[in-house]
Image (cartoon, helix red, strand yellow):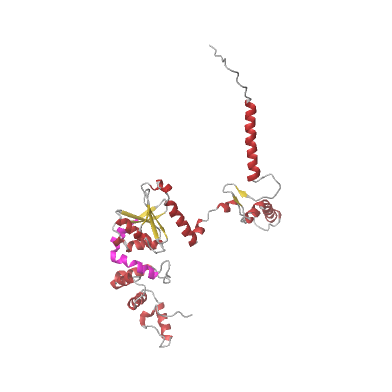
Amino acid sequence: MQARYFGPRLPTINTTATMSTIHETDVKSLVAILQSHWLDPFTSVQQDLVCLSPGKVAPPKIQQDLLTAKAVGEKAYQTFHIKRLKSQPSQIKFHDTITKAKLQTFTKLNKKKWRKFLLNPTNTKAFTEFVVKEWRQDRSETKLTGKVLFVTCESDCYESTSEASNTVEELNSTREEADIRLILHAAHAARSGHKAVVVASEDTDIFLLCLAFKCFILASMHVKCGAQTRIRYVSISSVVGAVGGELCKCLIGMHAFTGCDTVSAFTGRGKITALRLDKQQKSYKEMFKQLGMEWVLSNELFQSLQEFTCFQPGTDYINELRYRSAMLPSDTRPLTGRKTAITLPLTG
């Protein structure tokens, strides 16, 4: 069976000519982009060197090293050939280490310098504000489904969920260090009904803070430490139960007095001796519990700290300090006896 068409005659379309026009238009468009926006690698005119992946122009130092890389390599080969192979006897042994040229390439240009960037307090503040602002946007709601995110920016703290973002007044703090604010957040999590609080940190200061303030945090508390393949969870509750709550409360003062991140330590004397003295005498526990409670150091606490310093075994330099005190004029002489370790001036 055959079908026939009895209507008007259809116009003939030249498919080959139409496709050729389309291809020609595409090629002209591509050539226009190459000539107006791209660098021509075949031109003899000197142009800037551009790294294609980030689209960055290489600075003068990297450009010079890249353009002279061949010459530097040839010079290094000639030096190697003359000094190690051709000269008899050889000026340099054949298997001696070859000095690197240390040429800068695009790899240095693409290296992220986040650590150096965040060392600047202004950059850290600006980055934190940016993160807080982004997480408070509506487009971040889906990422927070089933989660509660607390972000601190300067003295303010924001609670962000998939539904809303609000300021948490009880977590606002003027403390700049994250160590203290971390304990504040742990206590807030316990009051909010969470049965366990995990603190991820390798810092000794944070570990001691957790021990000292565990009595105010009713939830089970753990410190997460270690590498990705060897993670450990240290139970703060178990440590407090084994050591004793009273001793844990005095650890902050003892740690600060015997040496921490901001306080110099006694030369050649660790914390074990100080910890043993704390266990032996209750008065030292009370002394370190009071240390740091007031801005102004009382005379009684000052005298107790001097006594504690002189009572540490192995403090042979105390006799030297006493001798220096005896050599001073009587009207400028500090306290006599073994309570002069701190007040004595250092002389050359």
State whether the magenta stretch is mostly helix, strand or loop: helix
Q: Is residue 309 visible?
A: yes
Closer to us: 149 or 224:
149
Q: Residue furthest bottom?
A: 330
* In magenta segment, residue 256: yes
Q: Position of residue 17 (x, y in %)?
A: 65, 28
Displayed quadrant of residue 288: bottom left
* In magenta segment, residue 134: no
Q: How many numbered badges does the structure rendering display?
A: 0
Q: Position of residue 47 (x, y in %)?
A: 67, 50
* Residue at left offset 63%, top offset 38%: 29
* Residue at left offset 31%, top offset 54%: 196
* Residue at left offset 29%, top offset 61%: 216
Displayed quadrant of residue 338: bottom left
Q: Residue furthest top?
A: 1
Q: Position of residue 77 (x, y in %)?
A: 68, 52
Q: Which residues are magenta?
A: 234-258
User: Is residue 59 depicted above or below 270 in this figure?
Assistant: above
Q: Residue 130 vs residue 289: left or right? A: right
User: Is residue 29 depicted above or below 279 in this figure?
Assistant: above
Q: Is residue 220 visible?
A: no
Q: Residue 56 vs residue 332: left or right? A: right
Q: Position of residue 162 (x, y in %)?
A: 38, 48
Closer to us: 327 or 331:
331
User: Is residue 260 depicted above or below 138 in this figure?
Assistant: below
